[in-house]
Image (cartoon, rainbow, N blue to C red):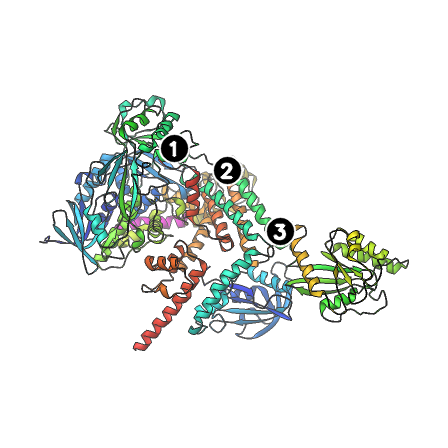
């Protein structure tokens, strides 16, 4: 980790959806990574220093473009860190930045530690001596706080899970090492197929955590939310209100929205794709019927629905239908037109759909909107199928470490089951896996393993 | 009064550490003086009559590759050979030889006596003499002064040695030998932080009183390989070992009388090793185990004495009798030497530098059990290391240091000086993170060049090795050049070799990666060449079969070296570094790591603390630059 001759990369702009975002790469491989990923009119072998180039970041696997970017190569020592540095200006959006960063890492960089660019800048004399204290504070504070935050994950016990994985691995290593270093002793060593099974179990646990990143729509794809309800309850107004701009046309005429309107907003760093839909009503018109079928499909496919009800009118059949159709979905039940007189009571709602607490809002004036966003966020982060494991992996560094660990563990398992005679090779893979996890789960030393051996087994002449 | 001669190197103690230290120094051209309390116990094996073992075999091979003596003497005197972990990969295979205890001692005695530049002297050294923070010599118990440029202390269990047998306690360096008390005081007075360790040895039994017929017999391996590259022939005689085990009766005797054990009565304060517990410890700590193994090993060709591995204890003699007799085969066994526990002083090795020189007294080196280690091999390795460095210092040459990626010796010294010890330290292969490249089989390749630079290995020997390495490289290259092509005939041949057929052309190099194939299996294929040198053949196989792992290990070595090469300036002041805990600040200030790499290995070190050190190191260097500028 302290080796400074590797290449680091990170998204340098703040989280969330901005106009543009910057992926920064620093280290000896920066230029090489540029050659692998950047396609532009100029030969990438002869890029000029400190020039802005227009081109594409491509995926070398598919050859297709990931984003159209502006790229600057700053050769050492004339860069922020004092090392060869790339700055890739991408289109904003967490998705794109994340995808570009992913490619950069596949091309040979590793995700930067918190504060690492600044640290390098300091160590390479790019910062003034008087800034030493500041940098120091930054680094110690960031490392500790960063770790705490990173470990707490989005929700709960990622750290706990990693600790368990780590101790399982130490246990496996104990079995392997004791069969190497204490063969002379009277240790009833664990049969190989059992160890192999244990490794397999850990792999599954690691894969499970990883899948929360891979499938985790929250961070990668964001969350899709469909706003649905009967006509003229204010769905488009709500979309505009959430968006903070007039996107959908709002009239008092029911059925103004015929098509879907999709827009993405940012709720606490999660890209939320909102879909405004046509109002649901009984209709004999073929086109409208078709449209309403589409709404049901859209809602079905969404991660979450916002069911909007007009608080200023009595409960209608359409309201029942909308609720019934979405009964098994993650839903927010919002009652609009808080500003007008109330013709619906909470009790009525609770009768129809127990356990769901309605939220009163005013799309027109903005009342209850922050609470609604909060509700969307909390529903998104603590329920859902893959989130049933109540953790979600968001940090790319953690993901990388886990991926490497999983790969090494697979090799170890292979080794143990194929070749019963070389526990030292499997042990090597498992140690490497532990080293990768060390960053997020704490380092493992030989003493940890020896301690375990000595307390588990009676060793000695 | 002063001794007429001034020595370059004085070595106090002629055990396994002392002999290697003295021989290395003398062979490097230093006038060397070697002390022993008793010349008849030079290189004595007071415990197990065996050299080598897991991870220890690697140490012996390394000592040999550097021009040391232990492997050669073991080869000359061994009567029982085992290759441990022979069913596992080459990295964790280790040789172990049971030697004739008396022959071993006498052979080493002869070597040290006949060595040019080496003077052997029987005396009890009572103190280190220093002047201005530097050792100038030693003084014996008669007050006689021996002047020396450097002093290596290798006192084993003799410092304040105290032998425990039940309630009996006797001051002794080993059973029947006098302890070294004055020297322990001298070290304390010099300001060293000392601790107390405990070890022990099992009873020796009379062979003719043992019923071997009821015991499982283990014979020596049929095709033993020597430790030393210089050995061409091993002894012909072989001695077997026998296995027995403790019984319920043994355990009952122990439990019923546990308060009579000096270990459990509270008499012993020293720390014993968790990996080498005495029998009472095993029974009490692992109560659910119904039996523990006992191994009976001959102490030599011309003796009745049998070493009873597994029966070490600190009970009074009447109980030792009962314990021994409760073991199958030993019902009528006669004890010739009783078991005992011994406590002794050690110096916390974090007080040493990388050369095993003390930080407190320049020119004073410590090696072996005095540094809290156990084992003949660990002692010999340190002895050699300290002897070489004492000689280099006396000759005003730069120090000799091996890294963790160079040798087990490097792992040993780095562990000692960086982590310190809280129990007797024994080497394990798992302590060596680069063990896949630190093998017995490549010890000469790793180290002989260094031994040659030191003047401990002859140029002829080194040239032979270089020739061999060239051949290995050439053979590997040839194999990657030779291709076989898929054909019915070839695949038939492969089938006969019990290996999968090929579908596309492959090189012999590629084919040899298959675990089931050995080099000589390929003889039926075109392009195969006979390799007559067994060692070359083995290296070719290992290099090819483990190529992927070796490559990965070498990559981590590169990373490791990056951190080792980031040196800490000697005068770096940790008290000014913010963000360090008091405990870490104290540790860093006393251990004074020479590199960021070493600092990282200090126990309790965190990433944030290391970053803090790194950043302040930069500041330190810059202010140093400025000072230089100011002066100009």
Count up the numbered dots.
Answer: 3
Left/right placement of residue B197 relative to residue A198 reads left
Left/right placement of residue B471 relative to residue B29 reads right
The chain that hosts pointer 3 is A
User: What's the CA distance linking mark 3 and mark 2?
Assistant: 33 Å
User: What's the CA distance linking mark 3 and mark 1?
Assistant: 46 Å
Q: Which residue is labeled 1 in the image?
A: B283
Q: Position of residue B511 (x, y in %)?
A: 49, 44
Tell which of B471 and A226 is nearer to you.
A226
The chain that hosts pointer 2 is A
Residue A369 to residue A403: above or below: below
Tell which of A225 and B575 is nearer to you.
B575
Residue B321 to residue B281: above or below: above
| Local crowd size for mark 3, using a 10 Å CA cut-off: few (<14), some (14–19), many (≥20) | some
Q: Which residue is labeled 2 in the image?
A: A192
Residue A390 to residue A335: above or below: above
Q: Position of residue B314 (x, y in %)?
A: 30, 34
Magenta residues span B455-475
Q: Earlier in the sequence, mark 3 or mark 2?
A: 2
Residue A301, visible in the rendered structure: yes
């Amino acid at each position: 980790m302290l080796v400074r001759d590797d290449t680091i990369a990170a998204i340098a702009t703040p989280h969330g959806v901005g106009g543009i975002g910057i992926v920064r790469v620093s280290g000896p491989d920066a230029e090489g990574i540029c050659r692998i990923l950047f396609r532009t009119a100029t030969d990438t072998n002869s890029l000029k220093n400190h020039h802005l180039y227009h081109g594409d970041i491509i995926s070398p696997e598919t050859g297709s473009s990931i984003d159209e970017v502006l790229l600057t190569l700053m050769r050492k020592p004339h860069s922020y860190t004092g090392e060869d540095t790339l700055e890739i200006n991408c289109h904003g959006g967490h998705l794109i930045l994340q995808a570009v960063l992913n490619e950069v890492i596949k091309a040979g960089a590793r995700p930067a530690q918190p504060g690492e660019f600044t640290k390098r800048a300091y160590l390479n004399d790019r910062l003034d001596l008087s800034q030493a204290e500041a940098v120091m504070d930054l680094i110690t504070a960031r490392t500790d706080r960063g770790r705490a935050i990173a470990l707490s994950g989005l929700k709960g016990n990622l750290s706990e899970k990693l600790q368990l994985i780590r101790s399982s691995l130490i246990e496996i290593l104990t079995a392997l090492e004791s069969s190497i270093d204490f063969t002379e002793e009277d240790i009833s060593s664990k049969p190989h197929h059992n160890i192999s099974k244990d490794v397999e179990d850990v792999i599954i646990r690691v894969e499970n955590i990883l899948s929360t990143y891979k499938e985790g729509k929250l961070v990668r794809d964001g969350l899709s939310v469909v706003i649905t309800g009967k006509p003229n309850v204010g769905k488009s107004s709500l979309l505009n209100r959430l968006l903070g701009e007039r996107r959908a046309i709002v009239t008092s005429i029911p059925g103004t929205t015929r098509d879907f309107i999709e827009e993405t907003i940012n709720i606490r760093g999660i890209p939320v794709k909102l879909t405004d839909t046509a109002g649901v009503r009984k209709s004999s018109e073929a086109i409208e019927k078709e449209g309403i079928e589409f709404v049901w499909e859209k809602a079905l496919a969404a991660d979450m629905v916002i069911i909007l009800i007009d608080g200023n009118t009595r409960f209608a059949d359409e309201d029942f239908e909308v609720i019934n159709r979405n009964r098994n979905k993650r839903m927010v039940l919002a009652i609009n037109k808080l500003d007008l007189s109330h013709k619906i009571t909470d009790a009525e709602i609770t009768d129809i759909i127990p356990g769901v607490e309605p939220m009163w809002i005013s799309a027109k004036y903005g009342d209850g909107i922050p609470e609604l966003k909060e509700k969307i966020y909390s529903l998104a982060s603590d329920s859902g199928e893959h989130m049933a494991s109540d953790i979600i992996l968001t940090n790319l560094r953690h993901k990388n470490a886990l991926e490497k660990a999983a790969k090494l563990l697979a090799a170890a398992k292979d080794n143990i089951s194929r070749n019963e005679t070389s526990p030292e090779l499997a042990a090597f893979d498992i140690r490497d896996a532990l080293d990768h996890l060390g960053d997020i789960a704490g380092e493992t030393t030989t003493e940890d393993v020896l301690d375990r051996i000595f307390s588990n087994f009676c060793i000695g002449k | 009064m002063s001794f007429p001669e001034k020595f370059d190197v004085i070595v106090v103690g002629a055990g396994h550490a002392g002999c290697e230290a003295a021989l290395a120094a003398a062979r490097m051209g230093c006038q060397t003086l070697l002390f022993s309390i008793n010349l008849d116990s030079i290189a004595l094996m007071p415990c197990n009559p065996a050299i080598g073992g897991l991870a220890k075999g690697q140490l012996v091979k390394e000592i040999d590759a550097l021009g040391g003596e232990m492997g050669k003497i073991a080869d000359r005197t061994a009567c029982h050979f085992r290759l441990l972990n022979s069913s596992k990969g080459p990295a964790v295979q280790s040789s172990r030889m049971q030697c004739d205890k008396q022959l071993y001692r006498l052979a080493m005695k002869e070597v040290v006596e006949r060595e040019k530049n080496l003077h052997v002297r029987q005396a009890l050294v009572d103190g280190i003499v220093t002047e201005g923070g530097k050792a100038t010599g030693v003084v014996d118990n008669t007050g006689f002064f021996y002047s020396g440029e450097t002093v290596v202390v290798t006192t084993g269990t003799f410092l304040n040695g105290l032998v425990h047998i039940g309630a009996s306690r006797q001051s002794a360096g080993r059973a029947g030998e006098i302890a070294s008390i004055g020297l322990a005081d001298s070290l304390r007075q010099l300001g060293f932080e000392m601790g107390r360790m405990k070890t022990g040895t099992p009873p020796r039994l009379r062979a003719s009183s043992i019923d071997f017929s009821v015991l499982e017999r283990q014979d020596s391996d049929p095709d033993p390989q020597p430790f030393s590259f210089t050995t061409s022939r091993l002894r012909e005689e072989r001695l077997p070992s026998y296995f027995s085990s403790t019984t319920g009766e043994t355990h009952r005797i122990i439990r019923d009388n546990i308060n009579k054990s000096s270990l459990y009565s509270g008499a012993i304060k020293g720390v014993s090793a968790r990996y080498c517990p005495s029998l009472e410890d095993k029974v009490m700590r692992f109560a659910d185990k119904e039996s523990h193994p006992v191994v009976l090993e001959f102490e030599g060709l011309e003796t009745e004495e049998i070493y009873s591995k597994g029966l070490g204890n600190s009970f009074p003699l009447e109980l030792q009798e009962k314990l021994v007799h409760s073991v199958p085969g030993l019902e009528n066994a006669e004890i010739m030497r009783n078991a005992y526990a011994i406590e002794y002083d050690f110096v916390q090795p974090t007080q040493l530098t990388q050369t095993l020189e003390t930080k407190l007294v320049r020119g004073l080196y410590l090696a072996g059990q005095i540094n809290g280690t156990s084992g003949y091999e660990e002692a010999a390795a340190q002895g050699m290391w300290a002897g070489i460095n004492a000689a280099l210092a006396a000759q005003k040459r730069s120090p000799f240091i091996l890294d963790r990626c160079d040798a087990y010796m490097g792992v040993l010294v780095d562990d000692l000086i960086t982590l310190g010890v809280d129990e007797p330290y024994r080497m394990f292969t798992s302590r060596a993170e680069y063990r896949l490249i630190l093998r017995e089989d490549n010890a000469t390749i790793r180290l002989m060049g260094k031994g040659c630079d030191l003047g401990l290995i002859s140029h002829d020997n080194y040239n032979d090795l270089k020739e061999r390495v060239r051949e290995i490289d050439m053979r590997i290259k040839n194999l990657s050049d030779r291709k076989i092509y898929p054909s019915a005939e070839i695949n038939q041949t492969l089938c006969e070799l019990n290996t999968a057929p090929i579908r596309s052309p492959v090189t012999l190099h590629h084919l040899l990666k298959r675990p089931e194939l050995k080099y000589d299996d390929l003889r039926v294929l075109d392009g195969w060449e006979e390799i007559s040198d067994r060692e070359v053949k083995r290296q070719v196989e290992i290099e090819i079969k483990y190529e992927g792992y070796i490559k990965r290990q070498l990559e981590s070595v590169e990373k490791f070296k990056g951190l080792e090469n980031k040196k800490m300036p000697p005068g770096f002041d940790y008290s000014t570094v913010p963000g360090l805990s008091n405990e870490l600040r104290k540790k860093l200030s006393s251990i004074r790591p020479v590199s960021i790499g070493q600092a990282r290995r200090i126990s309790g070190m965190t990433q944030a603390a290391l970053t803090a050190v790194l950043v302040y190191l930069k500041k330190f260097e810059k202010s140093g630059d400025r000072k230089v500028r100011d002066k100009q």
